[in-house]
Image (spheres, rainbow, N blue to C red):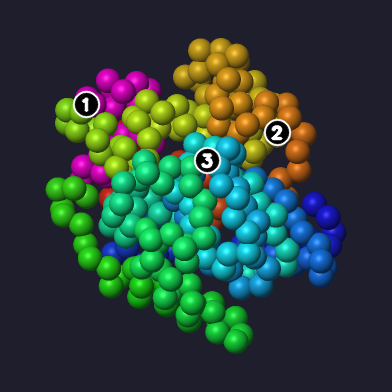
Amino acid sequence: MSPELTINVRFHAPPAALQRYFTSFYITEIGLPEGQVVADALQPEWANLRFFAGARPACWIEGGDYVAEARFVATGPSTRSTHFRLGATRFWGIGLLPLGWARFIGQPADDHANLVTDGHAHPSFAPFVQLADGLFGPEPDEAAEMAKIIATFDAMPKLDADEESRILAIHAALVDPETVTVAELVDRVGASQRTIERSCSRHFGFSPKLLLRRQRFMRSLAQFMLDRSLKWIGAIDEHYHDQAQFVRDFREFMGVSPRQYAAQPHPVLERFMYERARVHGAAVQTLDIPAGATTRAA
């Protein structure tokens, strides 16, 4: 990391009544000399809302749209890498779990899969435009900003209890490393395969099979990013049949080979992952266990 680049990340836990809807709330401060930018790429993740004060990012998802100069950047659930370039700035990030997507967005997640967009321009994110416009005051005030975020989400309508329970059950099964196949997912949730497929498309953004593949891949990638001494062979999830299968998944999800990815600098992502693992328990949001749900591994 360049000695001129500074990155500070602080995570904030949502209040207990809202915890099951979010991966995390976090504030990030990036320091750079005027005119300089840092480039990096995010891994596949759940949906996110990001609000910027300072430099605004240029960002794009592999094979998708390009967004620049947006103060409010929204992304849907992804199975591809999200690239960005960013100068000195301060921004809030809000990670929406599938249950949070269902409650606060309420639109089919598969229609927003691998989407990056200007939140001011996309109708699905209209409920957060007022927050984006009023979040930052003339001076940084982390406590006041956090209070505005909480108030916005707390005021939004609740979901049906049965729907919440089904989404949580599917999510808990997905993040359990012992759930490997769609048949095991169906058995674990106790609903019909068709019901699970519809719920995954609407609230998670992808088919159950693809979601399970993404989980397996992200367990491997997170392990490698946190401990480079393992090399790829030591980080690959035990449920991969062989290294070739992992390499195929890597190219599909990240757009490059494992060797190419390891050779690239990841100054923002690495700082973020280490801090997230230290404070939040999981290095990446796709491995978060939603509040109110447990896995057999836990």
Image quarter in which the C terminus is found: top left
Residue range highlighted in magenta: 165-188
The residue carrying mark 3 is 44
Question: Visible in this render: residue 282?
Answer: no
Q: Secondary structure at mark 1?
A: helix
Residue 222 occupies which quadrant of the picture?
A: top right
Residue 25: where, in percent of width, then height? 47, 62
At numbered mark 3, what does the secondary structure look like: helix, strand or loop? loop
The amino acid beneath tag 3 is: Pro
Q: Amino acid at mark 2?
A: Tyr
The residue under the point 52% across, 65% down is: 72
Q: Tell me what residue is drawn at x 49 percent, y 77 percent.
A: 133
Residue position for label 1 = 193
Q: Residue 45: horizontal and vertical position, in percent?
A: 49, 44
Residue type, mark 1 in image: Gln
- The residue at 35%/31% (across/down) is 207
Q: Give the distance between the C-alpha atoms of the residues marked 2 and 3, in whole angstroms.
A: 14 Å
On screen, residue 94 above or below 184: below
Q: Position of residue 124 (x, y in %)?
A: 37, 58
Kindly give the residue lying farthest to the right in the view shown.
Answer: 3
Q: Circle 2 — which element? A: helix
- Label whose residue precedes the other's in the sequence (2 or 1): 1
Depicted 185 relative to depicted 159: above or below: above
To which residue does mark 2 refer? 261
Count of marks overlaid on the render: 3
Quarter residue 18 falls in: bottom left
The quadrant in which residue 5 appears is: bottom right
Residue closer to the observer: 161 or 295: 161
